[in-house]
Amino acid sequence: MRFIDTNRIRHHSALLFLSIMLLTLSACGDGKSRTTEERIINIQAAVAEKREFRPYLSATGTLNPYEEALVSSEIDGIIRTVKADEGAKVAKGTLLAQVDDIDYVFEVKRSEAALNQTVATLKNTQIEYQRKESLFREQLVTQQQFDDILTRKALAEAEVERAKASLGISRQKHARTRIVSPFAGVVKEKKISPGDLVKNGTPAFTVIQTQMLKLNFSVPEKDVGKLKQGQEVTLRVDAYPDKEFKGRVNIVAPSLDEKTRSLKLEALVSNNDGMLKPGLFARVQHYTDIAQAVVVVPIISLLYEGDQVRVFVVEGTIAKERKVKPGGKYGELMEIVEGLKEGEQVVVIGQQNLAEGVKVNVAR
């Protein structure tokens, strides 16, 4: 009669159960691993292209008149007439307003009369001098008599010069009764009306020159080394969104603004057709070099993490992470200076879900 060793059966049963469990766990682990390895991320990609672009800096600026003058009265008086209104186009020397000049006209006439009198006196003195000079040579007049006429002649000549100077001042004062434009331009503001009492220095008009405009803008400190006079700029304004205007850098400030850490520049923009107006806000592209071929990718492909910039490129069906060095920005494209070659596929949508070595499916 055989006895069943129950302890041994239990021992074998336990070993069998443990083996089955290990096999089950192993099978489950392999399945999960295969699932991870075979997971595929759908993405969209774009090809890194080499294109020709002119390097430029983007900025915002304001258009200002080429010249702006506050025209003031140069004498005291009453405004008799005003000849120009705001917005009027004027040439250099155009009469803007007239101060009542009657007192100044009389002063000119008095000065002219005084000059005529001194000239007549001088002529008589010269005739007498010539006569006594001849007599003095013949020793028919004394030295004292000759010296007297010589002195009178010198005094008469001095009186003529004084009268001429007085007449010049009188005429200059009369000329100043005319308030005129200092240059060709447009009347921006009229500050006087007929009947106003003005004094020397009273503001009368503001005149601006607009055939050429000044574009004032600033560039950050990091780009200062790229700047120089004569560089081309283009600008657009909201008033004419489809039109591009051109200019050239005229002034590069000698020092930075300590508060903003930026450098101020001025460009001259032709405005012969009068389309542009002083005060307009402008979006500026400041070209710093000639056109050159660069590798560019869509800006949306870039991932920023601190000071580092990364992209994911597609190699076959695998995503590879790359650190890149960006350069200039050209609209929706960014130049890549280092880390990427022309023709490589760059992930533009879905890169946030990627990691090194993940399988991808490029959506078409």
Image (tube, helix red, strand yellow):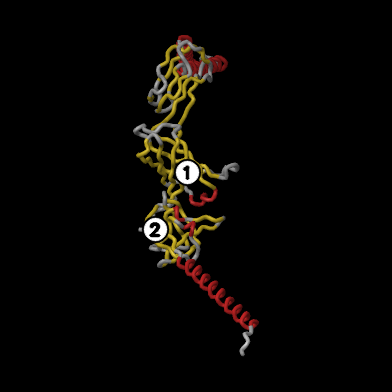
Q: Amino acid at mark 2?
A: Ala
Badge nearest the viewer, 1 or 2: 2
| Residue receiving disc 1 | 59
Position of the C terminus by quadrant? bottom left
Crowding at dot 1, Cα within 10 Å, few <14 / some 14-19 / many 20+, comes out as some
At x 43%, y 55%, the residue is: 349
Q: Residue furthest right?
A: 7
Front position in the image: 326 or 118: 326
Q: Secondary structure at mark 2?
A: strand
In the rendering, which numbered label is found on residue 46?
2
Residue 305, given in percent of the width and then of the height, sits at 55, 56
Q: Distance of mark 1 from mark 2, alpha carbons? A: 29 Å
**Vertical relation: 75 (above or below) 317:** above
Residue 61, given in percent of the width and then of the height, sits at 47, 39
Front position in the image: 205 or 153: 205
Crowding at dot 2, Cα within 10 Å, few <14 / some 14-19 / many 20+, comes out as some
Q: Earlier in the sequence, mark 1 or mark 2?
A: 2
Q: Amino acid at mark 1?
A: Ala
Front position in the image: 352 or 165: 352
Q: For residue 7, which quarter of the picture? A: bottom right
